[in-house]
Amino acid sequence: QVQLVESGGGLVQAGGSLRLSCATSGRTFASYHMGWFRQAPGQGREFVAGISRSGGTRYYADSVKGRFTISSDNAKNTVYLQIDSLKPEDTAVYYCAAAGAVLTAYADRYDYWGQGTQVTVSS
């Protein structure tokens, strides 16, 4: 069992930055590939970034490349999402998730989810 707790969301003006954190507990953090997703009101859950269990592979949705950076700290059992140059369309609840099998953009391949953290970007 893995527990995931996101933090770091908030209200920010367009052009600003946020760093989201996802603290994990339970089974060994390094056993899982980690992903960040977001869900805007009335929309489905969208993959934004993923990092392999080793930290050696990272990939991003085209919509966020160049603005979002995913990283992990195995010593702290935490994965981060740095978001720069925020846009109003980035407004969403952001979720982290853990996948035991494969690093993927497909939400249904993730085994564990956090409760989400709200990011609101004002124009």
Image: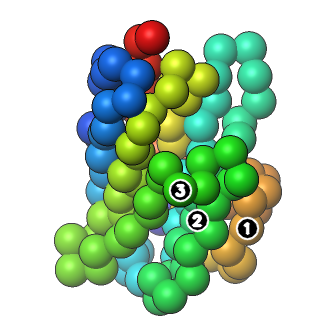
Residue type at the position of mark 3: Gly
Residue 57 appears in the picture as rendered: yes
Q: Is residue 51 above or below residue 80?
A: below
Q: Tell me, yes or no, whether the two marked residues, 3 and 2, touch with CB atoms within 8 Å.
A: no
Q: Are marks 2 and 1 in contact (CB under 8 Å)?
A: yes
Q: Position of residue 70 (x, y in %)?
A: 45, 63
Camera-nearest residue between 13 and 103: 13
Q: Amino acid at mark 2?
A: Gly
The quadrant in which the C terminus is found is top left
Query: For mark 1, what is the residue?
Result: 104
Give the residue drawn at x 31%, y 39%. Answer: 18
Viewer-nearest of labels 3 and 2? 3
On residue 50, which mark appears? 2
Label 3: few (<14), some (14–19) or many (≥20) C-alpha neighbours in 10 Å: few
Element type at mark 2: strand
Q: Which mark is residue 66?
A: 3
Q: Secondary structure at mark 3?
A: loop
**Residue in view at x 28 percent, y 74 percent:** 73
User: In the drawing, does residue 105 fall left or right of residue 84?
Assistant: right
N-term-proximal mark, 1 vs 3:
3
Any part of residue 20 in sight: no
Depth check, front residue: 26 or 39: 39
In the picture provided, is 18 more to the left or to the right than 56? left
Q: Nearer the viewer, mark 1 or mark 3?
A: 3
Residue 122 location, x and y as percent?
42, 12
Residue 89 picture location, percent across and down: 60, 23
- Residue 121 % position (x, y): 43, 19
Closer to us: 2 or 6: 6
